[in-house]
Amino acid sequence: MLLDSIRTQLDSLSKSERKVALAVLAAPNVIVTQNITALAKSAQVSEPTVVRFCRTLGYDGWHEFKLKLAQGLALALPGANEQPAPDDLASDLVNKICSRSINTLLDLRNNLKPELIQKALDILSRANKIEFYGQGSSGFVAADAQHKFFRSGVPTVAYTDPAIHSIAAALLREGDAVVAISQRGNNPALTRSAKLARRGGADVIVLAPSGTPLAEIATLFIPIDLVFAIDPYTPISARLAYLVVIDVLAVGLALQRGPEFRKKMQNAQKALQEFDMQFDSFIG
């Protein structure tokens, strides 16, 4: 949710904006009932500083920020911020993990900007080829993306080895596109490959947290601001946000390419189903 985004960006804020952030994190339920003057007073800053803080987070100003904060607090499910414990029953784990995952997706829906998705689709729809780069758990997202996008009719590949995506990036040219995926945004090898791709003229779409080295290189940056400091299991639910963004882009690209292409996709799916039926009959 929005509070997680604020936590992830604390270190990148100015000294005065950090005061505002800490005031919000200390009492978010109180902040949504106050006006900008009250928040400025409690944070011991000026009202323009509060506005700058809101804009740094990507909002037009105080009113949009306050609305998003209120929505996030209203949608938060109980148990979402509770850490799994050794003595948890299976029912406790179901509640905590499912609530956390649902909250992650609700937060994504509230903060993912449609105009950025459309710009990404415009880049992908005109690309000669699309390459997905990711490492570690983000490598699984990259592989999932390649599986979904290869049906788009555009040559598509995923690289999770830093040496390989470095070489691949150096070979890219204008008209190619890279989607670089990172849950932390500070991987040196991934950042280097993104730079190489840009140097060759390729477009680089970055899915990563705000204020990170990888974000600064992007042709188009789609921020996914989630917190990782809760417990070791947080990245598991956080990865869902990245998978959903990939789904949105894959479906959007298929729709954007028109009815003839969708018919080809349906024929491909039908052929796969027929193959599965023949294989089941063979082994049966």
Image (tube, grey):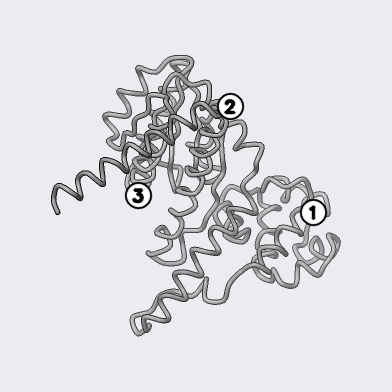
Give the residue at mark 2: 122
Q: Position of residue 102 (x, y in %)?
A: 53, 64
The amino acid at mark 3 is: Ser
Quick one: SS at disc 1?
Answer: helix
Q: Residue furthest left?
A: 283
Answer yes or no: is residue 219 visible. no
> From the viewer's perspective, is the residue at label 1 or at label 3 nearer?
3
Q: Position of residue 236 (x, y in %)?
A: 40, 59
* Cα distance in 3D space between marks 2 and 3: 27 Å
Residue 27 drawn above or below residue 178:
below
Q: Position of residue 230 (x, y in %)?
A: 46, 66
Give the residue at mark 1: 62
Q: Quadrant of the N terminus?
A: bottom right
In-image side of 79 versus 42 (left or right): left
Residue positioned 56% across, 31% down in the render: 121
Quick one: SS at disc 3?
Answer: helix
Residue positioned 53% across, 43% down in the render: 248
* Quadrant in the rendering for residue 252: top right
Q: Position of residue 11 (x, y in %)?
A: 56, 51
Q: Quadrant of the C terminus?
A: bottom left
The amino acid at mark 2 is: Asp
Answer yes or no: is residue 191 visible. yes
The amino acid at mark 1 is: Trp
Q: Within 10 angstroms of label 1, few (less than 14), some, or many (20 or more) residues?
A: some
* Quadrant in the rendering for residue 234: bottom left
Quick one: SS at disc 2?
Answer: helix
